[in-house]
Structure formats: structure tokens, C-alpha cells
Image (spheres, rainbow, N blue to C red):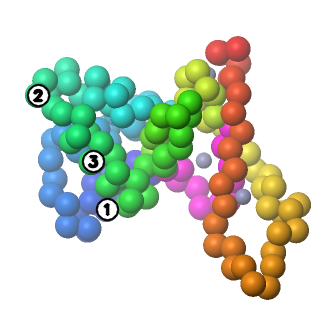
Amino acid sequence: MDVAKALLLLKEKGYKYTDKREQMLQLFSNEKRYIAAKDVLEAMQKDYPGLSFDTIYRNLSTFVELGILEMTELDGEKKFRFSCSTDQHHHHMICLTCGKTRHVHVCPMDQLKVSSEDFKIVDHKFEVYGYCKNCS
Ligand SMILES: [Zn+2]
Ligand SMILES: [Zn+2]
Ligand SMILES: [Zn+2]
């Protein structure tokens, strides 16, 4: 995902363009790691002092719904990052300090024999948590 693609997607889905939305997307484009809603608010308040947490949160939810952002919960807090551009199935190793991610190209579902006739699996989640080289 990148800013241009995200803006196009928003337009296609009938969301009107705003400077704030573009700036939020730019922030995620620059950060390339999981960040919390309060970090987004803090960064945005430099240019938009009156901005509320609700507005930030509503936009983040929309972005997740549209597949622009990925969300996960670290330490009981929801964190967001730009969705990966690759279509190739993969998982993430996530640094608990800086929120940076690395790709894992093995999938535990390949090993688990969980398929069953009376349950149709459509998706799964698998994340590895730890500390990157810079943070450990
Ligand atoms: Zn990825
Ligand atoms: Zn780190
Ligand atoms: Zn998988």
C-alpha cells in the first residue's frame, strides 16, 4: 500500500478527500511500523491542534476496513501500519519496542492438520513477537 493507492481507494469508495486524511496516510508511509492511535494524534496535532482522538480513531477504522491499514493488538493497545504490498502469503515478526516488522515466509497452517469437513477455514492469524536488533 502507498499514499497514492490509498487515496484512490478512498475516492473509489466515496470518501471525500481531506488534507488530514492525506497527512495521516503520509505518516504511515513514513513510519513503516506499527504505531498507536495516540502516536498518530500526537503527530497530527502539530498541524491540526484541534483534532480529536475520535476523528483519528474513526479514520483509522475506515482505513482498516478498506484494507489500507493492518491492525494488531500489542500490550492491549491497538496498533496500525500500512498493509503489505505483496500478495504472497506471509506472517510478521513484530518488535515490541519499535513496532517494526519482518516477514516470515513459512505458515504454521501448512503443518497443522486442522481441516475438517464440518468447518470451512477462511482465514487465520499468526504473529511472532520479540525485539529487533536495534532494540534488544
Ligand atoms: Zn507483511
Ligand atoms: Zn525494534
Ligand atoms: Zn499463514
Q: Amino acid at mark 1?
A: Leu
Residue underneath mark 1:
9
Disc 2 and disc 1 in contact, CB within 8 angstroms:
no
The residue labelled by disc 2 is: 50
Under circle 2, the secondary element is loop
Mark 2 vs 1, N-terminal side: 1
Three-letter amino acid code at the position of disc 3: Asn
Dot 3 corresponds to which residue?
Answer: 59
Q: Is residue 9 left or right of residue 124?
A: left
Q: Marks 3 and 1, Cα distance to the nearest angstrom?
A: 14 Å
Q: Which residues are magenta?
A: 83-93
Q: Position of residue 74 (x, y in %)?
A: 56, 34
Does the closest atom of ligand 1 sit within 8 Å of the Cβ of label 1? no
Q: Which residue is located at x 68 percent, y 23 percent?
A: 132
The answer to whether residue 22 of the structure is visible from this angle is no
| Mark 2 to mark 1 CA distance (whole Å) | 27 Å
